[in-house]
Amino acid sequence: MPQFMAEGDARAAIANGGRIENVIIVMQRGSDGRAEFVPYFAASWRRGYVAIGLWAGRGTRSWRDLTRLVGFVREELHYPGPMVLHEADDPKLRKYRTLFAAASEPAPSDRPDGAFDR
């Protein structure tokens, strides 16, 4: 199972009747102090939570504008449900550890440097 979900694969799965079932947004502060937001999705066509990968290379797609991220999830992925926002070091993310592991994705708070892949 790939570590990240390609945006095109998500769009294709949704077009074929799949759906996003849950969204967890993890906020991390970059070295410049600005917030970056990474959404992790639970989808009907795969197990666990997974992030969208970058177009080129390895890493996780992130947004610096939360309003744009919410718009992307609502309009492009057709998800009408609630989205939960956590800081990367939030201990409550530990309860999702098995869900991130099922998607072959380390839980955000488990990354050695505490940062997202860029």
Image: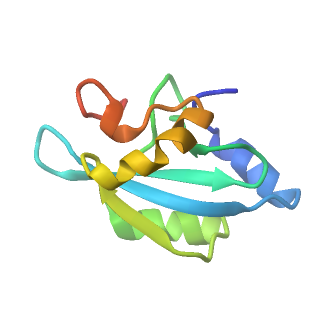
Look at 73% across and 53% down and name the residue there: 11
Q: Can the viewer see residue 64?
A: no
Q: In which quarter of the image is residue 53?
A: top right
Look at 63% across and 44% down and name the residue there: 48
Of residues 71 and 86, the one nearer the viewer is 86
Residue farthest toward the right in the current orientation of the protein: 16
Is residue 20 toward the left or the right of residue 109 in the image? right
Q: In which quarter of the image is residue 47?
A: top right
Is residue 26 toward the left or the right of residue 58 in the image? left
Q: Quadrant of residue 21?
A: bottom right
The number of numbered badges drawn on the structure is: 0
Above or below: residue 43 compared with residue 76: above
- The image shows residue 55 at horizontal and vertical percentages of 55, 34
Above or below: residue 5 compared with residue 43: above
Give the quadrant of the N terminus. Answer: top right
Q: How is the image coloured?
A: rainbow
- The image shows residue 117 at horizontal and vertical percentages of 37, 30
Of residues 98 and 104, the one nearer the viewer is 98
Give the quadrant of the C terminus. Answer: top left
Q: Can the viewer see residue 97?
A: yes
Look at 86% across and 61% down and name the residue there: 17
- The image shows residue 114 at horizontal and vertical percentages of 25, 33
Look at 64% across and 39% down and name the residue there: 6
- The image shows residue 4 at horizontal and vertical percentages of 58, 34
